[in-house]
Image (cartoon, helix red, strand yellow):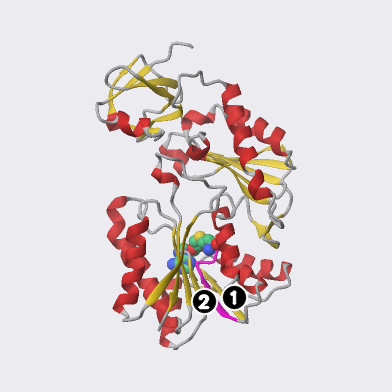
Amino acid sequence: MENLPVVHVINGRQKKLLQGHPWVYGNEIERVEGEPADGALVSVVDFRGRAMGTGVYNSRSLITVRLLTHRNEAVTDALIAARVRAACDYRRFVLRREGTDSCRLIYGEADRLPGVIADRFGSVIVLQVLSLGMERYTQVIADALIACQQPACLLLQNDDAIRLKEGMTCFAKVLHGALPEETVIQENGIRLCVDVLGGQKTGYFLDQKDNHLFLRQFCRDARVLDCFSYIGGFALNAAAAGAREVTAVDISESAVARIARNAALNDLRVQAVCANCFDFLREQVREKQRYDVVVLDPPAFTKARANMQNACRGYKEIALSAMRLLPAGGVLATHSCSYHMPEDVFVHTVLSAAQDLHRQVRVIALRRQDIDHPVLAGYPESHYLKSLWLQMLD
Ligand code: SAH
């Protein structure tokens, strides 16, 4: 193996690496032997000099080293390509589902490709490289994705502000084929028109696919409210399952325009409302509206652990309103997509809303992100989506 610069980790911090965590923060480094350039490969050793693995280095990022391997093996283009192939191979489980042609192909650290995201939307692949160290493997990753998946188009969607923190620029570029005028995907048999260039994240939240499907069983003849609906994932599944009336609410005008468009694409009826859900929910309570099913799927209220209390207040406020709209027997599906919000704290927060209202509830399910976003052992950050389903008993 080539001689790489060596990063020595301070005593005590080797444990998490041994457990499988792939990051070394700047304040966990005792010293660096050699002068690694930002983006270069480095060896990581513990305080005794024992090998911890090989990773990419970036002095400009709080996450100074991202490990690509915990073993004593050379990091080569071939290794990266093999990682991409393994990632795609695993996703066959999802792509075999009837009526689903889209999934996350590469989920960063959980596929041992740190900071790399690839989503397949029908015949279009959207690739994002969010760590400097992986930037130089962009073409290797793109080539491997093209060979495995044969997409009509591969879009490098590097237009994410996280890249600025890593010292990189933001841009979007088609690396293969041509971007179709419209990207229409299929999820659970529902057609969705997604915006891969101007939409949120890569264009659509593929992590909710199986929760969208899970919702269906509660929706026949029901009056359903989908809050923070983006382009209507939950709402359309509710309508497809025979809901009597479906309302979808989002603050983004472009997302709301797409809900209406997607409903028409599937010949379904969804009432799309552009509003702040906090206000909308309060108003519905004031009007004494009643729903059989309410879905809450807000954006991450906290991007840092320090804001946890505020985040809890936010989750509780919308849970309180939602529960007021639900009679006995009603179902609430509520979500948190912030990994800083631990599952037990989230569950406690939502249940405390029921307590405040003197309502008894029962937990129907506690779910998480779909399996194309697997959770890497030793790396709790990869479990970010919490999905709590309750039924009101009185
Ligand atoms: N439920 C969606 C994903 C939601 S992502 C799905 O299953 O695909 C969160 C959404 O909340 C985004 O679409 C964002 O535009 C919207 N949003 C953020 N703040 C909001 C607010 N205060 N009121 C309403 N919508 C909001």
Front-most of 29 and 135?
A: 29
Q: Which residue is mark 1?
A: 219
Looking at the picture, which amino acid does disc 1 mark?
A: Cys
Q: Which residue is mark 2?
A: 293
**Which stretch appears magenta?**
222-230
Q: Is residue 316 left or right of residue 151?
A: left
Q: Is residue 67 left or right of residue 194?
A: left
Taking 229 as reference, is 177 above or below it?
above
Quarter of the image for residue 319 reads bottom left
Q: Residue furthest left?
A: 11
Q: CA distance from mark 2 to mark 1?
A: 7 Å
Front-most of 381 and 317?
A: 381
Residue 353 place in picture, x, y as percent: 33, 73
Residue 360 within the magenta-colored segment of the rendering = no
Q: Is residue 116 left or right of residue 278?
A: right
Q: Earlier in the sequence, mark 2 or mark 1?
A: 1
Q: For mark 1, does the 10 Å Cα neighbourhood hold few (<14), some (14 to 19), or many (20 or more) residues?
A: many
